[in-house]
Amino acid sequence: MAEEENQLITRDYLAIERTRLANERTFLAYFRTAVVFLSAGFAILQLDALQELRLLGWFLLCLSPAILVVGVIRLVYVRRKIRKYYKQS
């Protein structure tokens, strides 16, 4: 009887899978944003026409890794929460 209570029904299993996929999509959004900031920072620093925006270019270059780190931390945090509360056999 106790083992039956630990089994997930199909609806719950699919909900957990949707949550995992949403977590991965969120990480990919953070990753995409970090890549865009990184490339925009490089572009601003490389173009001579945008010399007055060099400070913005450096800011974007420094912000990009921070965004990526936040995305990775969030991915790992949510993944651990899912595993903690919904252990599957």
Image (cartoon, rainbow, N blue to C red):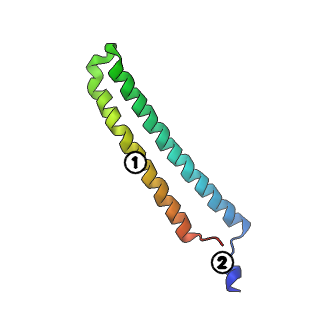
Q: Disc 1 on helix, strand or loop?
A: helix
Q: What type is the residue that disc 1 sits on?
A: Val
Cα distance between the residues tagged 1 and 2: 35 Å
- Reading the image, the residue beneath label 2 is 6
Q: What type is the residue that disc 2 sits on?
A: Asn
Image coordinates for residue 63, horizontal then vertical, percent: 34, 38
| Residue 69 - label | 1
Q: Residue at x 30, y 33 (%)?
A: 59
Residue 81 lies, with reference to residue 52, above or below; the image says below
Of tags 1 and 2, the one toward the viewer is: 1
Q: Disc 2 on helix, strand or loop?
A: helix
* Cβ atoms at labels 1 and 2 below 8 Å apart: no
The quarter in which the C terminus is drawn is: bottom right
User: Quadrant of the rendered structure where residue 83 is?
Assistant: bottom right
The foreground one among 31 and 5 is 31
Q: Residue at x 56, y 47 (%)?
A: 25
- Residue ranking furthest to the right: 10
Q: Residue at x 42, y 44 (%)?
A: 68
Image coordinates for residue 40, horizontal then vertical, percent: 40, 27
Figure label count: 2
Q: Residue at x 32, y 27 (%)?
A: 57
The quarter in which the N terminus is drawn is: bottom right
- Residue ranking furthest to the bottom: 1
Q: Residues within 10 Å of mark 1 (few under 14, many from 20)?
A: some
Q: Residues within 10 Å of mark 2 (few under 14, many from 20)?
A: few
Image coordinates for residue 4, horizontal then vertical, percent: 71, 80
The foreground one among 34 and 5 is 34
